[in-house]
Amino acid sequence: MVQFEKNGIPTVAIVTEGFQHDARMTTRGLGLKDPALAVISSTLTSHPAEDIRERVGESFESIVAGLTQERPAVIEEEKASPKTYRFQAASSYDAFEEMNAFFLRNRWGDGFPIIPPTELKVERMLSGTSRRPNEIVTVLEPGMGEATVEKIAINAVMAGCLPEHMPVLIAAVQGMSDPLFAMRKVACSTGPHAPILIINGPVRKELNINCGRGALGPGAQSFANTVIGRAIRLIIMNIGHAYVGELDMDTIGSPIKYSMCLGENEEQNPWEPFHVERGFAKDASTVTVYGVESQLEVMDLVAHEPERLLLTFAGTGNSAGACSTSAWLQENRSRPHMLLVCPDHAAVIANRGWSKQDVKEFLYHNAHIEWRYLKHGNQLIPERVVPPWKWLYDAPENTLLPIGAGPHWFNIIVVGGSVGKSSWLTSIGEPVTVEIRK
């Protein structure tokens, strides 16, 4: 809509009442003031076609008015002046509480207490990188905020990070700006999408990144994982302007949106590390950013043969409710799966001579779902299905389908402690790997 308007073509967006504010903030972030909107009372999803036509028909006058009214103005680039806030109270603890309440009212916090981003603390955080404070790392979607090194440092302080975490955060922000990552979808979706950070190389040990037991969980062993992941969430909110109800339209939410960061357990990985698979040197330090939709446990404490174990994996990822299961049937929708394989499971597979590629081939040919589970839902309508697969609408409903476009839709990370519990991550977008540099 914004691109049409900038080229002088009148455009109207049909939105529901609950999404008005989101629509206005989205277009404003893209440079258009006061967009022409035709507002309807309720959502158009999960309704039969005749109901949708009736609802849209009710907004016909608004559509005509929007197309014939004076055109909305294109916003001139605005530069916000930095502000300093001071909090005074009977004690420093009271001032701390007052500051946290103020930040939360302004939606700058994630709900947990934050560390005050004082000038001294921000300056100390900036000592962790050789980059200039005013250097723009990227313009971060969805709100198109300038992600300067200093702004990243401010949010890092708030999250409880240490100065040595700055290079990881800067590289992660760079990765999230790659179009393959699909930042706008991750940040704005009505689903509980969130980035996961996967750290490889020597930096894992330098920063005490937890690659073993409880890598995605709480506790002292995951301090670095927790604060780095939390800083990314604050950056998405405060620099990308993805606040709940304003750009971030998540329906229910998920705790994965608070913090999701781990290191690959390269020491117990029988295959090449993930970053080497993606073309980086083994001694390079990298961070991979990847949009996660949900996390499913893969429990198998019995299977000691690759085929039997991988059938457990195959029977876990074929979820009809996960968008990644059917995305390959639609144009321009890439949602490869990611498997977090525990060392015990990896050993069972690799000890029989299976490579990563063997695992991917097996899953592609054995992780199936019946067409009937996708035909009537999961965003699939005939118009969206790519031409080579439209024959499915004339096929028996028990036709078995793969859950990916090919073996390359299955990414494998070795992580965790002993005992046979792995995880299957459904996704959005593509993983993007960036080398970490100071």
Image (spheres, grey):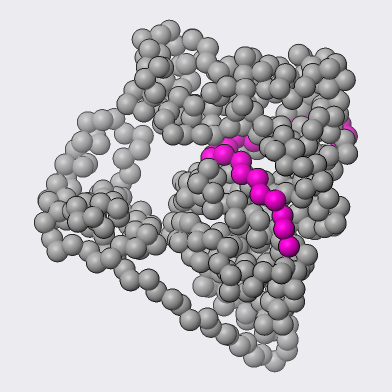
- Residue drawn where x is 67% and y is 59% of the image: 169
Residue 412 lies, in percent from the top left, at 71, 32
Q: Quadrant of residue 425?
A: top right
Q: In the rendered view, tell whether residue 203 sits above or below residue 408.
A: below
In the rendered image, the quadrant that contains the C terminus is bottom right
Instruction: Determine whether, in the image, residue 183 is placed left or right of residue 211.
Output: left
Residue 329 in the figure: left or right of residue 285? left
Tally of numbered tags: 0
Q: Is residue 234 magenta?
A: no
In the image, residue 368 above or below residue 246: above
Task: Name the spot of residue 137 as percent of width and height, x first.
Answer: 58, 63
Q: Is residue 142 left or right of residue 164?
A: left
The answer to whether residue 310 is seen in the rendering is yes
Residue 423 located within the stretch drawn in magenta: yes
From which residue to which does the magenta span run? 417-438
Magenta stretch, main secondary structure, is: strand
Q: Is residue 321 left or right of residue 99?
A: left
* Residue 96 visible in rendering: no
- Tell me: residue 56, above or below residue 62: above
Q: x%, y% of residue 15? A: 29, 50
Residue plotted at (86% across, 25% down): 347
